[in-house]
Image (tube, rainbow, N blue to C red):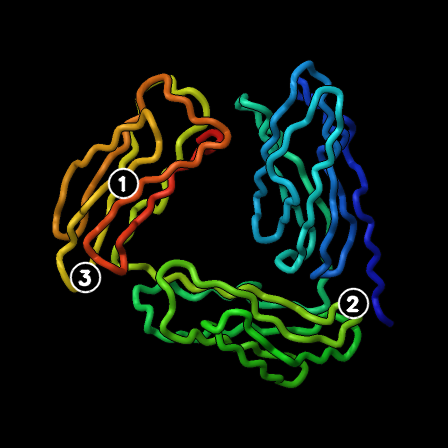
Amino acid sequence: MILVIIIFSDTILAKSKIVGDLKIENDTVNFGKVLVGTSVPISFDLTNIGNTSIPIKVVPSCESCTKILESTFIIEVGKTSKLNVKLETFELTGPSERTLSLYVGNTMKRIILRMKGEVFSPIKIDPSYIYFPKSKNKDLSQTLSVFIQNESNMDLLLDGVFSENKIFSPKLVRINDKYELLVKTVPPLNYGKNEGYISFKTNYPKLPVYKIKAVSNIQPPIYFTPSRIYLKKGIQSKPVRKYFKLSFENLQKPINILNTELSAKGLILEKLEKTNKYISYSIYLPEGYKVSNSYEEQLKITTNLPEFNNVVLEIKGLDGF
């Protein structure tokens, strides 16, 4: 007997909610029970009940599995806009929830929109992701394996394994009633995050292709610690300093800083110390400095090394600490 999966999309769980001049018809949507790999359309109705237009910005909690058709838009007075989302379920299993952060106008108000449901998969992947150990050597080849177990009541056949990123080389091996997926990295890798989906064909009804993500992080010889700076959103009630380092190791020649460029106005960059392994800095935020909902700035450091000519540190706003 084949299990039939029925999609109950956009089942509203919550009543309407009013935040300031914005009315939300449904802040929680239950998409029901769906088969893994299903692309689920979800929409939220937003109405402006005020006297001025309302700018909206939407940020997903999971960028790879949530596709927002329009992440920034304006709702005019008396009008209703639909926030349309596609939830990709390849990375979800069992009872699942994903959220959207809705930022209203130029205020610091954030509204959480929720998408809930259950994702059924006829196969069990262990582990569910392919994450290679972090390495400093981009010429190192590593191999990982995941085991695939049939959770359905039919004879499951898998074949046609394929990698969308040539950095990963996959091989699918059947072992009795199970499969083993072997994935090897193919040097040279890129510095930073290397990622891509490994896919294979299945004979399960309505699931012709299954995907699993592979990730390999290669630490470059020049890097920031921490890798990004977060600032608390809102108006700073007192002066704040954020400390970080530009670290370097295994360089072929000494590093020279040719230029530093801070995109944010009102912040002060301070150089604190230089050793043969790092340069330490701080960023100073004066009292009264405002970090908006859309705050995204960066520090760019230009060096004398061609392969690492520009090293960028992201500076972003964050809700609460």
| Residue depth check, mark 1 versus mark 3: number of the one nearer the observer | 3
Give the residue type that dot 1 points to: Phe
Query: Which residue is depicted at the point 76% across and 56% down?
Result: 34
State the count of labels.
Answer: 3
Report which residue position mark 1 lands on: 244
Residue 281 locus on image (x, y percent) = 22, 38
Q: Earlier in the sequence, mark 2 or mark 1?
A: 2
Q: Place residue 142 in its image quadrant.
A: bottom left
Report which residue position mark 2 lands on: 206
Q: Is residue 43 above or below residue 211?
A: above
Compared across the picture, whether 191 is left or right of 131 comes to: left
Query: Which residue is depicted at the point 73% across and 78% down?
Result: 156
Q: CA distance from mark 3 to mark 2?
A: 52 Å
Assign a secondary structure to mark 1: strand
Q: Place residue 242 in its image quadrant.
A: top left
Residue 97 locus on image (x, y percent) = 66, 46
Report which residue position mark 3 lands on: 251
Q: CA distance from mark 2 to mark 1?
A: 50 Å
Q: Earlier in the sequence, mark 1 or mark 3?
A: 1
Query: Which residue is depicted at the point 71% across and 42% down?
Result: 84
Residue 312 locus on image (x, y percent) = 33, 46
Q: Residue furthest right?
A: 1
Give the residue type that dot 2 points to: Lys
Q: CA distance from mark 1 to mark 3?
A: 20 Å
Determine crowd level at label 2: few under 14, some 14-19, many 20+ residues with C-alpha closer than 10 A.
few
